[in-house]
Image: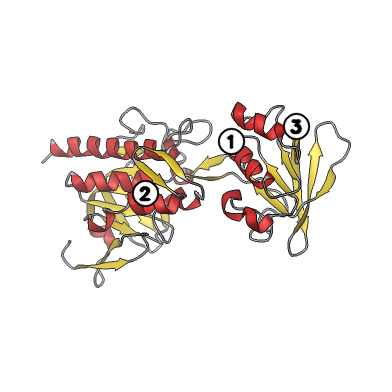
Amino acid sequence: MLPGSFEIRDNALAGGSVLQTKIAGSEIANRLMHDVIIIGAGPAGLSAALWCDELGLDTIVLEQNEQAGGQLHSIYGPVVNYPGVHAKDGSEFFERFSERTGEAEFDLWTNTEIESIDVKAKRVRLRSGEELQGISIIIATGVRRRQLGIPGESEFVGHGLIESASRDRNEFAGKDVCVVGGGDAAAENALLLAEVCPTVTVVHRNKALRARPTFVQQLQSQHCITIFLEAVVTRIMGNHEVEAVEIRRKDALKPFQMAVQGVVIRIGVVPNTQLFRGQLELDDEGYAVVNNRQETNVVNVFAIGDVANPLAPTISGAAGAGATAAKVIASRLGGRR
């Protein structure tokens, strides 16, 4: 521990504890230098933190949410493709993944909002006014779901917008629903809802679905599923709950309305790189561009997990990238000490 600081432990980490460090009195964090500042506490960020701790690096992890785990808490189906682990859902997987976190010595600050980052200076300013200085920064900010940006999309959250068919399908059993999107996630949600809903309408803007062929075949074999290609949902309507969607098809003179009581939106994801625009090299979709050491175009600034891996975003890939970044940093700092 640092002089003049104290530990706060709580149960924000499922199955473990969160270690938080705050500086006592008027001294604040802008006087502290860390070997590594990790932004984001999903699988990638926590993997990096555990490896940094193992390698003896002074590390702090910043997480904007109340608990660590990132997108794991949005996985409501079984996790079966992480080597050696089988979990009923993302939360159970997180419990196992984070078993060592409570024993580690790195600092994890939750509910922490970042105001700005100077990646070249390795300086992070928090909305609370504190400033953190690091020798290295690891960006593990992940992705968020892409939004349609249409009327009703935000108004009906919790009132007919379906977060996950795995979690919510019993609530929508016997109701007509609409799934927006054409990839694997959209197809999976449509197939799950088709088991309990009388009609499922899939709306996709392109000429063909992007989902894997096996999913497409299953969709086409379900009599209750209707697929509208080259079409978009332009409005979600209702009073207190979702009652209909407005759909516009290509070359149609005007949109038409379809009565539904539930809507799933799965149109891809967007990387959380808005804090780094103009400072780091990003690809056309906004993902961080990294080399085989997970390093960005700024020396000693790394990006790991989904935020830097648009082609193969997996839990195992995120964990491996975290280990890579930590080992590269440790090897460099080892030469300075």
Residue on which the image places disc 1: 184
Please report contact status of discs 1 and 3: CB closer than 8 Å, yes or no: no
Query: Does the rendering let one see residue 186?
Result: yes
Sequence order check, earlier mark of 2 and 1: 2
Return the x and y of residue 121 as percentages of the image width and height.
Answer: 31, 44
* Distance between the alpha carbons at the discs numbered 2 and 3: 39 Å
The picture quadrant where one finds residue 295 is: top left
Instruction: Determine whether the residue tagged by mark 2 lies in a helix, strand or loop.
Output: strand
At 68% from the left and 50% from the top, the residue drawn is: 196
Which residue matches tag 3? 230
**Residue that carries the numbered disc 2 in the rendered image:** 39
Q: How many marks?
A: 3
Which residue is at 65% across, 35% downward?
182
Q: Secondary structure at mark 3?
A: loop
Residue 321 in the image: state x and y as whole percent. Answer: 33, 36
Where is the C terminus found, in terms of image quarters? top left
